[in-house]
Amino acid sequence: MPYATAMSCDHGDSRRANIDLRGTSFKGAPGFFELRGWGQHGSQAYSFADQVVSLKGGGYRGWNAPLMKGFSHPSSLTRE
């Protein structure tokens, strides 16, 4: 599973991921994460001046992860 990915197959948003960039000059970009998969559920919460991003994700076979243009599934990184 790639970093910053919350994925489950239990029909809910039961998985969590967290990105903490405090102590750096970087921030989490709004719109950088997306819900994908089948029956996806999830959310993103930005805090500490957008340097901490907390993800919830899941679904029937869903995930919340960074935008991965051209890839169909984050765990296998197979191309669409």
Image (cartoon, rainbow, N blue to C red):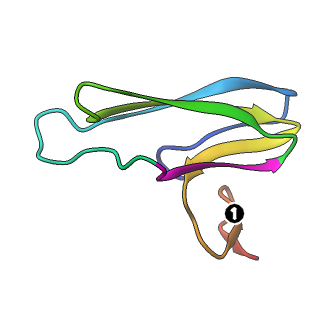
| Residue 55 in view here | no
What range is drawn magenta here?
31-37
Mark 1, Cα crowd under 10 Å, few <14 / some 14-19 / many 20+, is few
When the figure is inspected, residue 11 is found, relative to residue 74, above or below; the finding is above
When the figure is inspected, residue 76 is found, relative to residue 48, above or below; the finding is below
**Nearer to me, 76 or 66:** 66
- Callout 1 amino acid: Ser
Q: Quadrant of the C terminus?
A: bottom right
| Residue occupying the point 67% across, 55% down | 75
Query: Position of 24 compared to 34: left or right?
Result: left
**Nearer to me, 17 or 41:** 41
The reply to whether the magenta stretch includes residue 77 is no
Query: Position of 43 compared to 40: left or right?
Result: left
| Residue occupying the point 87% across, 40% down | 39
- What is the magenta segment's predominant secondary structure? strand
| Residue occupying the point 65% across, 27% down | 15
Query: Position of 26 compared to 66: left or right?
Result: left
Q: Secondary structure at mark 1?
A: loop
Where is residue 46 shown, x and y percent of the image?
39, 30
* Res 48 quadrant in image: top left
| Residue 27 in view here | yes
* Res 63 quadrant in image: top right
| Residue occupying the point 67% across, 32% down | 42
Where is residue 12 shown, x and y percent of the image?
80, 24
Query: Position of 5 compared to 42: left or right?
Result: left
Q: Which residue is mark 1?
A: 76
